[in-house]
Image (spheres, coloured by chain):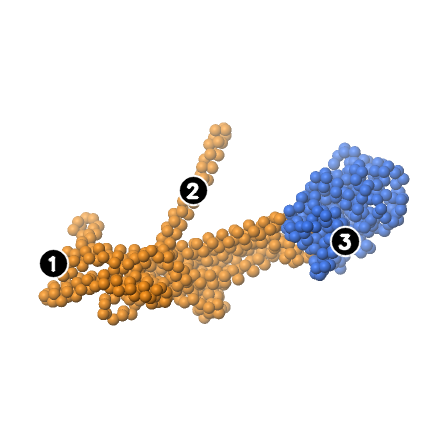
Amino acid sequence: MSPATQDGRTGVDTGLGDRFKPSNVASGREDVPPLHDILEQTEAHVATRDFSIFYRDNEAVKKITMEIPMRLVTAIIGPSGCGKSTLLRAINRMNDLIPGCHTTGEMRFDGQDIYDKKIDVAILRRRVGMVFQKPNPFPKSIYDNVAYGPRLHGITRHSRLDEIVQRSLVQAALWEEVKDRLDTNGLGLSGGQQQRLCLARALAVDPEILLMDEPTSALDPRATTRIEDLIGELRGSYTIIIVTHNMQQAARVSDLTAFLYEGVLVEYGPTKQLFTKPREKQTEDYITGRFG
Amino acid sequence: MGMKARNLLDRLFSGVGVLAIVVMGLALVLILAPIFSRGAGAYIFKATVEHRRMLLERFERGNAEALAAEAEAVREARAPVYAMLARYAAEDLAGLSGREKREARQRLEEVEDILQELFGPMPGAATPVLPRQQYGATRWDRAEVKLDRLLYVETWDYSDSGSMGQQVLKPRREEFAGTALEPLFGYVETHLEAMLRPEWTFYWGFLTDSSFDAHIFGGIWPELVGTIYLTLGAMVFAVPLGIVSAIYFAEYAQEGRLVSLLRTCVSTLAGVPSIVFGLFGLAFFINTMHVSRSKSVLAGSLTLGMLILPTVIRAAEEAIRAVPHSYKEAAVGLGAGRWRTVVTVILPAALPGILTGTVISMGRAAGETAPIIFTAAVSVGKVLSPWETLTQPTPALSWNIYNLCTEHEAVDEIRHVQFGMAATLVLAVLLLNLVAIIMRARISNKLKG
């Protein structure tokens, strides 16, 4: 386990006191509270009930019922094709872009049904930001990349935009590296910098939830560590849901882990417990590398 | 199949491929080389004093004093010719009578005609009505051809009934042996330069002058402007419409029977012969919609716009589809709607491709002849004001190249104009492509960072 993840965590008030700290895995604390305790302590930010996702007739995600707590880091793991990305993308309705994709059951965000007809998807997506697998900055300047979201949502005053751009880049730990070349193209940055730029872009619209779809799979180990550190720093301010196929990463950065297999939620619980004392045989097989 | 056979097949295949490319390149050279080399003759040629006189009188360009001095020198050089003519008429012709006199007069008139083509009207004669008779040979290359006609009589020998007639060139001097006119031919041959004073000239006016007397004099400015009007007009109609259609196809259309039918329509439209578009333009825009009373730049632009629309749609759709999906995801993920995504992310990223397609179709619109025959083109006309383009027809390069080749009454006199027009058109299209390549490279660089 990388010790670097600990640094980011210190001083984050989760509202849980010392009873629950994600770094407990690394720091060796054994008193992991059970899931229902955690969910009692913090509100559920996203909650699903019998939630299924179909690609035409093919059920990719099957009747999942889970609650994702506010301001903590929740990891979704599972072998390729298990539906973890599909589930993640359902939270900000990115799956709408795919023809023939539909859902059953319900998914609530802050108590509101995300798939209600009356939901304004633009507002939903502003509140639920997303960072993608491959860094995907726009072919625009660094400044315009970060300012894209705020502009989209009607902020035009320069001083206000400057402020947001700086704040977001600072949050994404990119400010110091790019502050002198904000007008250069975002695609000119390195891969890791590009991914942090994308993070800054997502943060610029002040989301409540950050969805991360394998955010480090295209990055080298150093850039990966920086992103993981950032997740630690953002924890406590944002609800973070991260999809990863890297189990060490899930163990390092998350408070809770959900294991998905063939569209079914096999096990969901505190990360420490899931990785040390999995309740399900399938989970154990997966995390010990017997398949996946 | 053995390895040898496979290798042979591979080699054969690449051999045929290379051959095809070489043939194509050769064809390009064979087409472009004469166009450019002979087209250059419209701009750079040995211009005679007659050319300078024409420029001064018709376009008020040139040095009047220098020309007056030149005209004096030329008059002196030409004076013996006219003196010989006068002597022949007074001495030799007067002594003849009847049929002999008629024949001699006819021979004299032939000589006089050629001399007029070379040097303009005889001194003291009334100014002819046609401009082509008011000036002698303005180009030295034409003067040399006319000199040949003066020196030799072309006759045909049909004595061998078994084969085709043979052309026989007989010195004209022999027709006038022993008369006062006999020395004329030798004199003109040796003194032609002094009588016409040819000088190498760069005639930029070929591009910027209007023509008169059926393109025999002047330049191609009205044609060039007409082509620009028609091309820009076609762009104005086709580009916005094409981009919007492409956006619809690439971003909005739900793949289904109707959309695939629409796509087929677009593809089919791209393959329709251009003459059909011309007839359609006449039947629809002029006869049905009455966009103008008769041919007009407006009707021609609409027709050309229809012609290039499928190309623009195709190119723009390809360009839009080539934009990485991740850009779209990023924009949508931030809460951008479809339209916002298209305008702020997809179109800017697709711009280089759209631009390329647009310029290619621009070249096509500039060069198409058939669609404007019935809708916009006339062979002679003046430069239109933008306002007049709504109602007036215009000459255009493509149509005039064709027209001057097929329907001109003095085609030998305007060969240089034909090639000059073709070279100018090709050059303009090449320049357009060059601009597009540069713009595309610049935008691509900006996008790449």
Which residue is denoted by mark 3 in the rendering?
A207
What amino acid is found at the position of numbered circle 3 in the picture? Pro
Residue at left offset 49%, top offset 28% = B2
Along the line of sight, which residue is nearer the eye, B134 or B301?
B134
Question: Is B62 displayed left or right of A33 in the figure?
Answer: left
Observer-side mark, 3 or 1, equals 1
Residue B421 at x, y percent in the picture? 39, 57
- Quarter placement of the N terminus of chain A: top right
Residue at left offset 78%, top offset 51% = A209
Quadrant housing residue B400: bottom left
The CA span between labels 1 and 2 is 62 Å
Q: Mark 1 Cα within 10 Å, few/some/many (few <14, many 20+)? A: few
Chain B, which colour? orange
Question: Is B214 displayed left or right of A29 in the figure?
Answer: left
Which residue is denoted by mark 1 in the rendering?
B178
Quadrant housing residue B369: bottom left
What amino acid is found at the position of numbered circle 2 in the picture? Val
Regarding mark 3 in the picture, which secondary structure is present there? loop
The CA span between labels 3 and 1 is 111 Å
Between disc 1 and disc 2, whose residue precedes? 2
Residue B264 at x, y percent in the picture? 54, 54
Chain A, which colour? blue
Which residue is denoted by mark 2 in the rendering?
B22
What amino acid is found at the position of numbered circle 1 in the picture? Gly
Residues marked 3 and 1, same chain: no
The CA span between labels 2 and 3 is 61 Å
Residue B265 at x, y percent in the picture? 53, 56
Observer-side mark, 1 or 2, equals 1
